[in-house]
Image (cartoon, rainbow, N blue to C red):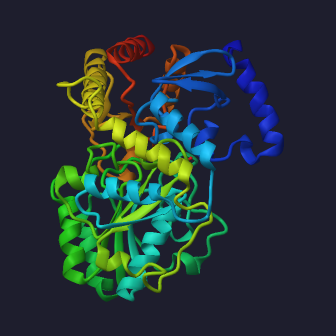
Amino acid sequence: MSNRYSQSKTLFAAAQEVIPGGVNSPVRAFRGVGGSPIFVARGSGPHFWDEDGNRYIDYVLSWGPLLLGHAHPTVTAAIAEQAERGTSYGAPTRLETELAELVISLMPGLEQVRFVNSGTEATMSALRLARAYTGRSKIVKFSGCYHGHADMLLVQAGSGVATLGLPDSPGVTASTTADTLTAEFNDLDAVWALFADHGDDIAAVIVEPIAANMGFVLPENGFLQGLRDLTREHGALLVFDEVMTGFRVAPGGAQGLWGIDPDLTCLGKVIGGGLPVGAYAGKRAIMQHVAPAGPMYQAGTLSGNPLAMAAGLSTLKTAFASKHQGEPDRFTLAVQRTRELSDGMRAIGEELNIPLQVGSVGTMWGCYFLNEAGVHITSYVEAKQYADTKRFAAFFWAMAERGVYLAPSQFEAGFLSTAHGEAEIAATLAAARAALT
Ligand code: HOZ
């Protein structure tokens, strides 16, 4: 690695001495692209600067939360203002109700919300609730979908598990995953077969409505509605994991965009505006089973943390308001930029005859390098078969050299913020063209 990253390299060596693998989450370790991770010193708007002073246009944005970009003044002011009044009380605050009301008003399927501290907690709790509510034990998840690192969900998982090529995780006992059934994403027939065999035992089907932890895979026509119909027919719950898609693909998430009505929804990332947060939410009749309203126990010292609530509130309010009167809101403009980026990438692939699968919805996007022209990835099995991870790794570093930071794995999605403007998109496309020529 050149001197361009010398400080990062030194810091990584020190980190590895005291932190397993030098990172606090495996996806940060760059195992999917080789080399040392880039250590971040500071961020502002669409950019961050590394410890060597290099500036990057950031398409990771803390893996999704930073819908307004880094250190948006409204968000930092909201955090600072709240910090002056205290950072945590372990007692209810008005902010929790305000954020719950705002989230409910934006997402059509929600009636009640319980805040937790991470996406992992959200999915784990939602599934406990689904089991409590239905009195059944089995859950269905899709290969390549990642719902955090709870034991029962570390089966055929995406994200870092996919990047590292791990089978499943040691430490997860057979009994904890005995009730986890899997199917390929977009394979409704496989789900139908699971219901045929286990229909009376299935508590819930959990799905990322866009599979964004194995790259970026859209649901095929009828897949999500098919899941809705099958779960209803068999008395199981449909759980949408919108930790990534929530407030990213549309104000109402994927459920709002495509008109699907899940029973439960998991949220995280954007609703904390860059601070640790998660939430599970859904129909009142189901949420009323959560303690203390009902018997299903779930708790957390820092749940509904006031700093996170303040950051989330200011992020959502700012994103869905216009900067100038008469203009579309900031989110809508960011969607436009995202489309320009994905259209531009597709055009570069066509022009240079490089097989790419590029997609975007709202402010999320993804780009597979394909090892065969004419194929189209719709599932995890196909992602593993057709994604050219070597070519992606070379592209990742060529883009980093040119000041563009992408997720360091072919099996992750990309994000834009409302701070990414025309100039950033033009610079990114110019970098991509140069990197691929
Ligand atoms: N959902 C994130 C990646 N797809 C998780 C980030 C992490 O594991 O740190």
Image: 233 above or below 146: below
Image coordinates of residue 320 in percent, x first then y, are 29, 38
Image: 179 above or below 158: below
Q: Residue at x 79, y 26 (%)?
A: 10
Q: Residue at x 39, y 86 (%)?
A: 136
Q: Residue at x 39, y 89 (%)?
A: 135
Q: Quadrant of residue 301?
A: bottom right
Image coordinates of residue 198 in percent, x first then y, are 33, 84
The residue lying toward the viewer, choosing from 102 and 258, is 102
- Quarter the C terminus occupies: top left
Image coordinates of residue 297 in percent, x first then y, are 52, 80
The answer to whether residue 390 of the structure is visible from this angle is yes
Q: Residue at x 48, y 81 (%)?
A: 292
Q: Quadrant of residue 325?
A: top left
Image coordinates of residue 78 in percent, x first then y, are 50, 39
On the rendered structure, is 430 left or right of 299? left
On the rendered structure, is 91 left or right of 268? right
- Quarter the N terminus occupies: top right
Image: 262 above or below 66: below
The answer to whether residue 180 of the structure is visible from this angle is no
On the rendered structure, is 21 left or right of 152? right
